[in-house]
Amino acid sequence: MKREPVTDRLDRVLGLLASRPSWTAPELAEELGVCVRTVRRDLSRLSARGVPIESDAGRGGGIRVPPRTGLGRVQLSAQELLDLLLALALAERLESPLLLSTLKSLRQKLAASFPPEERARVGKLRRRILVGPTSRNVTATWKPPRAAVLRPLQESFFEQRALELTYRSNDVRTVRTVEPHYLLLSWPAWYLLVWDHLRGAVRMLRVDRIESASVQAATFQVRDSESMLATLGDIFAAL
């Protein structure tokens, strides 16, 4: 089993300490899936970084941080940053009243966390999320997408790399290579607007019908969304 990086585990320790008034070392060890010795070593690391950890020995004692204590900056992985950017892009497209006042600054701060060569793609991300009409025809059949599919889908979408997938439609399965140019929300369904290499044409694929997916080495340039949607004609209008 792959070992969790120390920095990631320290972030988890901070999150646990902030989640309730007090913990014991065995409780933290159980939550983290490590031994008590590792927990004590992690607590020492956090104390050395200036986190004000308090502990009481003996029965009824515990480990805690004082109330109202800030626990430092949150460190996110690249995948977590991408998930946040996608969520912000969706909120922006939906014109969410709860986030509109801070969306721009949040997006800029997150974008600054990516390497310079990737920031251009980050800036264009929100324009690649489309919001369409409600999908009345699929409400009864829509189900959550497979968890194993979401990560390669997101990676190929952001990296502008081809995606090989197994797609099921009317009990017929096909293996195809596609370019995921746009994500389309037509509530409650999510679609991929793709260039399908198998068909040699634009296609709109329901995300919950993708049974498996893997990212390919081939890259692509994003096509114009209006021209892609225009080729679908009545299919898009019928959503």
Image (spheres, rainbow, N blue to C red):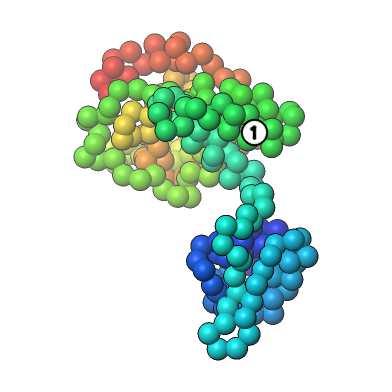
Up/down of 100 relative to 172, above or below: above
Residue found 58% across the figure and 33% down from its top: 106
> Residue 139, located in which quarter of the rendered image?
top left
Q: Position of residue 136 (x, y in %)?
A: 22, 29
State the count of labels.
1
The C terminus: image quadrant: top left
Pick the residue in front: 161 or 14.
14
Residue for point 48% across, 43% down: 150
Q: Can you see residue 78?
A: yes
Instruction: Give the image location of residue 142, x and y in percent.
Output: 29, 40
Q: Residue furthest right?
A: 48
On screen, residue 42 versus residue 229, left or right, reads right
Residue 198 appears in the picture as rendered: no
**Secondary-structure class at tag 1:** helix
| In this view, 194 is above or below 24 | above
Quick check: 40 left or right of 67? right
Amino acid type indicated by mark 1: Lys
**Residue visible at 54% across and 39% down?**
84
Q: Quadrant of the N terminus?
A: bottom right
Tell which of 37 and 86 is nearer to you. Answer: 37
- Looking at the image, is 88 positioned above or below residue 127? below
Q: In terms of image quadrants, where is residue 97? A: top left
Task: Name the spot of residue 59 as percent of width and height, x first.
Answer: 55, 89
Question: In x, y percent, where is residue 237?
Answer: 28, 17
- Badge 1 crowding class, 10 Å Cα cut-off, few under 14, some 14 to 19, many 20 or more, is few
| Residue sitting at x 73%, y 34% | 115
Which residue is more in the foreground, 52 or 170?
A: 52
Q: Nearer the viewer, residue 209 or 34?
A: 34
**Res 130 → quadrant:** top left
Residue identified by numbered label 1:
109
